[in-house]
Image (cartoon, rainbow, N blue to C red):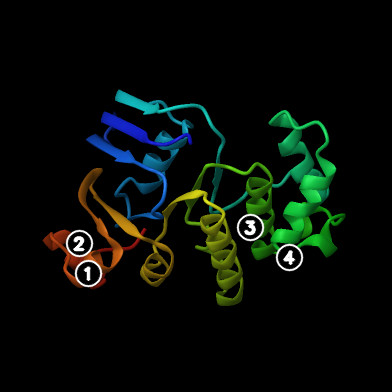
C-alpha cells in the first residue's frame, strides 16, 4: 500500500499554518472547515500538486493516487477516449477494455462515444470518477465533488464513492455538505484558519465537537466552504 501519508510541520504561504498529521489506509477521511480554512490547498499539497512552503510530505512507498475536482477537466474527445488517454499516460498499453469497464462502473457505457464536453455536469463528474476508477488508485482525493450538482446527481456520485471505498481505495474528501460528511465519512479533520483543530470519528465530531469553532460551524454560524 502507498499509505501512510505523513505531513510534518507543513505550511503553505499564509493559507496552511504549520501542521503535522498522518493518514493511513482504511477509514474514509472527510476534511471540513469554513470558507478559506484551507481545505482545497491541503488536498493539493497531499496530492503533490503544490509544493509546501515549509515542512515535508512523504509516502511510505510509491503507488497510484488520483484526484477529482469540483469542476472536472474534460478533454476534447469522447468519454471513452478521455479514459483511454489517462490510462496511456499512466503507462497502460491496452487501454480500451479497462476504459470501457470503468464507464460501465459509473453507468456511462451508453455515452462512451459522446463528446465529453457536451455531457451534463453530473455525467462529467461521473466520467472524472471513471478515469480515476480505471487507474485503481490506492488513494482518491475528492475536492468538493458534488458542490454544483442536483440531488439526483449527488446520489449517483455518492454511490460511486462508496464503491471506491468498498474496493479498498482510501477516500480523502473535502466537502461543504455536512450530511454528506456523515453519510460517507469515518473520520473528520476539521480545519480552521489553516490549522487542524480536531480529528475525530465522524459521529463524535457532530455529537460532541471539542472546540467552539467546530460547534459554531456545525450550527451554521460559520460560513461553509
First in residue order: circle 3 vs circle 4: 4
As drawn, the label of residue 107 is 4
First reached walking from the N terminus: tag 1 or tag 3: 3
Q: Provide the secondary structure element on which disc 2 rests.
A: helix
Residue under label 1, please give it: 221
Q: CA distance from mark 4 to mark 1?
A: 38 Å
Q: Which residue is mark 2?
A: 214
Establish if 173 lies above or below 87: below
The residue depicted at 24 percent of the width and 35 percent of the height is 20
Q: Is residue 196 left or right of residue 5?
A: left
Q: Secondary structure at mark 4?
A: loop
Nearest to viewer (mark 1 / mark 3): 3
Q: Nearer the viewer, mark 4 or mark 2?
A: 4
User: Is residue 199 in view?
Assistant: yes
The answer to whether mark 4 and mark 2 are in CB contact below 8 A is no
Tell me if residue 12 comes above or below residue 36 in the rendering: above
How far apart are the alpha carbons under marks 3 and 4?
A: 12 Å
CA separation in Å, label 2 and label 1:
10 Å
- What residue is pinned by disc 3? 125
Give the left or right position of residue 33, taking residue 100 as reference: left
Q: What is the crowding at mark 1: few (fewer than 14 residues within 10 Å), some, or many (at least 20)?
A: few
Residue visible at 87% across and 54% down in the picture:
113
Mark 3 vs mark 4, foreground winner is 4
Q: Nearer the viewer, mark 2 or mark 1?
A: 2
124 or 165: which is nearer to us? 165
Of pointers 2 and 1, the one earlier in the residue sequence: 2
Q: Mark 3, residues whose alpha carbon is within 10 Å: few (<14), some, or many (≥20)?
A: many
Q: Quadrant location of the C terminus? A: bottom left
Position in image of residue 178 (x %, y %):
36, 68
Q: Residue at x 32, y 50 (%)?
A: 36
Amino acid at each position: 500500500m502507498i499509505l501512510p501519508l505523513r505531513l510534518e510541520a507543513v505550511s503553505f504561504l499564509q493559507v496552511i499554518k504549520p501542521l503535522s498529521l498522518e493518514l493511513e489506509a482504511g477509514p474514509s477521511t472527510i476534511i471540513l472547515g469554513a470558507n478559506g480554512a484551507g481545505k482545497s490547498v491541503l488536498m493539493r499539497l497531499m496530492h503533490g500538486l503544490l509544493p509546501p512552503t515549509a515542512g515535508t510530505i512523504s509516502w511510505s512507498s510509491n503507488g497510484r493516487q488520483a484526484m477529482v475536482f469540483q469542476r472536472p477537466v474534460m478533454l476534447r474527445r469522447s468519454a471513452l477516449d478521455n479514459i483511454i488517454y489517462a490510462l496511456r499516460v499512466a503507462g497502460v498499453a491496452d487501454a480500451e477494455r479497462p476504459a470501457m469497464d470503468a464507464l460501465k462502473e459509473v453507468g456511462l457505457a451508453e455515452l462512451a462515444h459522446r463528446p465529453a464536453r457536451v455531457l451534463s455536469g453530473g455525467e462529467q463528474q461521473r466520467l472524472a470518477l471513471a478515469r480515476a476508477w480505471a487507474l485503481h488508485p490506492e488513494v482518491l482525493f475528492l475536492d468538493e465533488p458534488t458542490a454544483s450538482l442536483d440531488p439526483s446527481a449527488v446520489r449517483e456520485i455518492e454511490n460511486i464513492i462508496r464503491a471506491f471505498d468498498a474496493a479498498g481505495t482510501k477516500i480523502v474528501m473535502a466537502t461543504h455538505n455536512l450530511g454528506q460528511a456523515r453519510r460517507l465519512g469515518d473520520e473528520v479533520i476539521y480545519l480552521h484558519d489553516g490549522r487542524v483543530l480536531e480529528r475525530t470519528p465522524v459521529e463524535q465530531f457532530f455529537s460532541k465537537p471539542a472546540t467552539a469553532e467546530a460547534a459554531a460551524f456545525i450550527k451554521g454560524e460559520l460560513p461553509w466552504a
